[in-house]
Each structure stands twice: as structure tokens, then as C-alpha cells.
Amino acid sequence: MGKASSASGDNKELSDFLRSRRARVTPEQAGVTPGPSRRVPGLRREEVALSAGLSADYYIRLERGRVGNASEAVLEAVARALLLDDVERAHLFALARPQSVVTVSRSALPRRVRPGAYALLEVLRDTPAMILDGRMDVLALNALARAIFADFETMPICERNLARFMFLDPVARELFVEWDMAARMVVTGLHLYAGRRPDDPQLTELIDRLSEADADFRRWWAAHDVEAFSHGTRHYRHPVVGEFTLNYETLIFPGDPDQWLFVSTAEPGSPASAALRALAGRIGNTNDA
């Protein structure tokens, strides 16, 4: 259930994704008049095929993951028929054309953080910041991020992962005021990575572990939603400084698109700004001691 890819010739991830998107589109959205005996949610396969200008047989094989050389024009037509947004469209292309993705074997190699990226974390000492990869492994973080989230650098390497923290550490459910929203967004990010790296063994192990341990993760993973959380806000309930809200931005490193910087900032003069100063003061006092 939790595997990112299928060992058979069929592309199960593509199949599941297309079926989940098809079920989401109503006949009215697609300009189809539903008949009285309609039994399925969303569109029928034949209706998607008609809207995309494909034969029903071809689309059925595509949805079953049995078409390995779908053209860009075909995928564009399917994306339009299923009303995919830009992130979903990119995910469809990654799933349907894995040969265009960078060799998967790289994903199993240890991630190296450049010295300049470490220096950037130090420059950002007044705001929580961390460097993650597409699998949500925490590669590096500064002192303020450790004070808010967790001291990932003291954990075994295999456990330094934001998704593991969200679903397996009870601290996360207390820390995130809107835990459901934050946790589900982590799942959508993992699905995006799975589309680019379908044969990553560490990702498969992570998905299996979380699926076994948490019902929320199982349900959200099965939904096949994808989202690029590039910016937004998060509400926290910290045991030391109480509740506060931070804005976040994610910035991809140009030299490695599978590494990105997650930075949280506070509005000047806000309670969040005071909370960060208080935490920074505690860190300073601890270091001085």
C-alpha cells in the first residue's frame, strides 16, 4: 500500500493518481450531462477520453499504467480534461514519463550540504531556518529551528525527517495548532517527490513506516493530492513562549533542485517577533552557561 512504485510492468502510481483526479471532476465541470443511472463519482473513463480527444481504449490503458511512451500532447490533453493545476500537471508528466527524470540512483546517496549553505543558516540566526531534501530529510538547521521544532542533529540519521516528526512524534501534534493542515501538506510534498524519484528505496521505507503507524497518513497518502508549499503561514503553540504565527518561504537551491531552504519569519513588532527574541535569549543563555 505504501510503496512509491510498483515492481510490475504497470505504473501503479500513475494509475492511482489519474483515478483520484478523475473522481474529483464533476460531470458539470466537464460539460457532461449526467444520466439517471450514473454510479461513479466524477467522470467515467470514456468521458475523460472524449474530452481529451483520445480513444477510450488508449485512455483506459493509460489510466491502468500500461502506456510507457505517452506523448507530451497526450498528457497535456489529459491534464486539461482532468482540470489539473500546474503542480498536478507537472506531477502527471513526472509519473508518465519517468525516463525524463534524473537517474533515480542519486536519491539513495547521502545528501551533501554545501559550506555556503551552512553559512547561510548562520547568517539567518535570528529566524528559524532548515535545509531539507525532497524526501523531507532534515539535512541541516540553525539553533532557533532546533528550539522550535526538534534537535534533529541529535537523532539517528535515519530519523532526521520532517514527515517522521510530524506523524511519529507527539510533540508535533502539540506544536502545530493546525496540525491536520500542516501534516497533510507534508504528505502532498512527499507525493511530488515520489513522482520524480519513484524507485527511491528510502522513500519506500519511509512511506511504509508512516502508513503502518498512522491512519491519517494512510488516508492522505491514498488521496494522491500534490501541492508545492512555497510560502504561507503556520500557527505554533510552543511550551516555552506560547502561541505565535510565522510566515514561511521555501527556496530551492539552484545547484540542487532536491535541496531547499525552509525559512520562517515574524512580522516586525508582532507577538511572534517577541517569541523568537525570547527563544533566542534562552539559546544565548544556554550557550553562555
Image (cartoon, grey):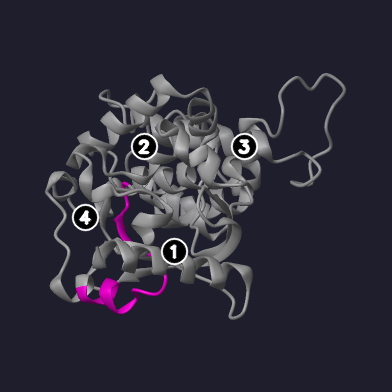
**Residue at the spot of label 2:** 164
Disc nearest the viewer among 1 and 2:
1
Label pair 4/2, CB-CB below 8 angstroms: no
Residue 198 located left or right of residue 77: left
**Residue at the spot of label 4:** 102
Q: CA distance from mark 3 to mark 2?
A: 30 Å
278 is higher (above) or lower (below) than 50 = below
Residue 262: percent from the left, percent from the top?
A: 39, 64
Q: Quick one: label 3 or label 2, which is nearer the N terminus?
A: 3
**Residue at the spot of label 3:** 22
Q: CA distance from mark 1 to mark 3?
A: 47 Å
Q: Quick one: label 4 or label 2, which is nearer the N terminus?
A: 4
Q: Which residues are magenta?
A: 119-135
The residue sitting at 22% across, 36% down in the picture is 202
**Residue at the spot of label 1:** 279
Local SS, label 2: helix
Residue 143 located left or right of residue 59: left
Residue 210: percent from the left, percent from the top?
A: 39, 28
Q: CA distance from mark 4 to mark 2?
A: 26 Å
Disc nearest the viewer among 3 and 4:
4
Label pair 1/3, CB-CB below 8 angstroms: no
Local SS, label 1: helix
